[in-house]
Amino acid sequence: MIRKMAEDVLRRLELIKNKKILVVGDVGVDEYVIGDVNRISPEAPVPVLDVTEESLRLGLSANVAQNIASLFSQPILLSVVGNDPAADQLRNLLKKEKVDDSGLIVDNSRPTTRKLRVMAQHHHIVRVDFEHRKFLNSVAEKDLLQRAADLIPKVDGVILQDYAKGIFSENVAQKLIKMAREKEKKVLVDPHRTTPLRYYRGADLIKPNFQEALALAKMTEDDLHVNKNLLPEVVRVITEQGNFGRVVVTRGKHGMTIYENGQLAQVPTFAREVFDVTGAGDTVIASLALGWVSGFNLAEAALLANAAAGVVVAKIGCVPCHFDEAQTALQNLKNFQENA
């Protein structure tokens, strides 16, 4: 079945090109400092990193946007940044990846989110976050909603990408969903585990990972120990409380679980090597949205998303899956199915 579906998706993959997707959410810059550790500091019992590489990359919703661009479609990024050097770095990175930065609203009262990751080759040593977690002020919120009202009629779909930095108050999220539904645009939500489900109520699809799904359903690992088959109940709670038509739960090495029309289905994972899962969820929501608005059914869109995620987890950091990589990954699924 997977082989046949992969062949069908591969045959129609050109359909995802040139779609317009509005990505609304928190944005930031990911900074990587990578090197080798061969000794312990004489000043304190900590490793000494001999730096071999430094890089800046797009993070948070900006990574979703660059994944859409790398699949030959057109992301429109709507977010809020500060008036600071990190915002300049972000704009330069967006320009390099051919992502339009005209939807970035400047708020002088908040910094642009920046995350510094220090790594010894593939291993994280420490992460340092520069950010404020607070809701937008009234001026920035009004500006964001007005721009959304102007942009939504021009796109094929909308992604609400929540990292709980403050973009999505309940008012903002509900007004965005209402605008999109009035224009008959699909709304996909990539949620944060701390945001109440009612914020996203009425979206067409929600895509939590398994830990987020547990948190959103107000369940814990203890519940999972008691009931090993807890996932159907988790999905039921999420669906009923959020009035979602579809739920896609990403489950790492266990693939994805899809809920649609009252039925659960499974899509296996296709990652062969896993070096870094950072940003994999961004790749999933970007490719899932593109597949779905291009006419793929949800299972086919999820297959594309899982194949794309299998590409990016074999790399370090927030990096996108390119169109040719997605093609190759889908082609490889024929062998994957035969050897599974």
Image (cartoon, rainbow, N blue to C red):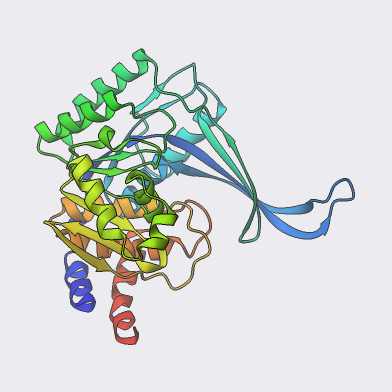
Q: If the image is split into quadrants, where does the N terminus sit?
A: bottom left
Using the image, determine if residue 73 lies above or below residue 266. above
Residue 17 appears in the figure = no
Where residue 130 appears, as percent x and y from the top left, is 58, 32
Residue visible at 34% across and 29% down in the picture:
168
Left or right of 141, for residue 121: right
Residue visible at 24% across and 20% down in the picture:
146
Q: Quadrant of residue 104?
A: top left
Q: Residue furthest right?
A: 42
Using the image, determine if residue 137 lies above or below residue 331. above
Left or right of 64, for residue 266: left
Where residue 150 appears, as percent x and y from the top left, is 20, 25
Q: Residue furthest front?
A: 226
Q: Which residue is more in the foreground, 333 or 134?
A: 134
Q: Which residue is more in the foreground, 50 or 236?
A: 236
Where residue 223 appears, as percent x and y from the top left, is 39, 56
Q: Residue furthest bottom?
A: 339
Q: If the image is split into quadrants, where does the C terminus sit?
A: bottom left
Q: Residue furthest top?
A: 139
Q: Quadrant of residue 203?
A: top left
Q: Quadrant of residue 187?
A: top left
Using the image, determine if residue 133 lies above or below residue 38. above
Where residue 192 appears, as percent x and y from the top left, is 38, 41
- Count of marks placed on residues: 0
Using the image, determine if residue 204 lies above or below residue 283. above
Residue visible at 39% across and 21% down in the picture:
136
Residue visible at 39% across and 61% down in the picture:
226
